[in-house]
Amino acid sequence: MNSPPKPIEVSTYAGHAERSGAMQAQLRDILARVDSSDIVANAIASLEQARTLAQHLKQAQVRLMRRMQDLSRTLGDTQRASEDLIIAGEEPDLAALGQCEAQHRLITRAHQRIVERLLPEAEIGETSATASHLAAQAKSLRAEAETRIAKTAQLMAEAAEF
């Protein structure tokens, strides 16, 4: 015994713009489902974490560069003042000079570490996370497309029964 046919939803559009708008809305819905899937959501979280780290390191690099420049000026002034005191036959404040030099070396090494190792590693991590996100998104889109293809095939088979 044949079961009654299932109703088929048919959409009509007044024109190209309306049809295009409807297709864009469907595409947005599909992309929202894809982005909310666990695999893509996890990839997005990893990507945001990698971006945050890279941004933090870039800001630290700029901050340390400014600090190095300030310390270089301060160190130069302190060295000239110490030299002037020695020329005048007085004893300079070697502790202040040593502290300024130590700060400058420390800031320089930290900046160098960011520039030579940490920032490149963070940028590689960000690129890798971007690739993982795009791969996850592609996998999820492929699954969505397969579902839609199967539904279309089913509807076509049902239509052929008429």
Image (tube, grey):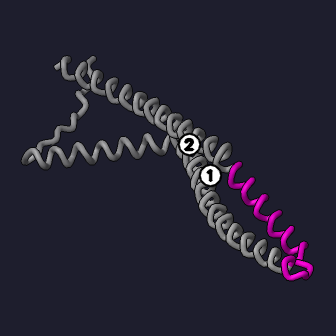
Name the residue rendered at 67%, 50% in the picture. Answer: 114
| Nearer to the camera, 139 or 155 | 139
Name the residue rendered at 86%, 67% in the picture. Answer: 98
Q: Quadrant of the N terminus?
A: top left
Q: Is residue 59 above or below residue 41?
A: below
| Nearer to the camera, 155 or 52 | 52
Residue 160 lies, in percent from the top left, at 18, 18
The residue segment tinted magenta is 86-113
- Whole-angstrom CA distance, mark 2 to mark 1, is 9 Å
Q: Secondary structure at mark 2?
A: helix
Name the residue rendered at 25%, 31% in the picture. Answer: 6
| Nearer to the camera, 153 or 131 | 131
**In the visual, does 110 lie left or right of 156?**
right
Q: Which residue is mark 2?
A: 126
Residue 91 lies, in percent from the top left, at 92, 79
Q: Secondary structure at mark 1?
A: helix
Residue 157 lies, in percent from the top left, at 25, 19
For label 2, count other residues whose C-alpha is less than 10 Å away and answer few (under 14), some (14-19) or many (20+): many
Residue 107 lies, in percent from the top left, at 74, 60
The earlier-in-sequence mark between 2 and 1 is 1
- Asked whether the residues under the numbered discs 2 and 1 touch, taking CB atoms below 8 Å apart as contact, a structural biologist would say yes
Q: Is residue 56 above or below residue 141?
A: below
- Is 88 magenta? The answer is yes
Q: Amino acid at mark 1?
A: Leu
- Is 76 magenta? The answer is no
Q: Which mark is residue 53?
A: 1
Q: Quadrant of the C terminus?
A: top left
Our reading of the magenta stretch's main secondary structure is: helix
Q: Amino acid at mark 2?
A: Glu
Q: Is residue 24 above or below residue 144?
A: below
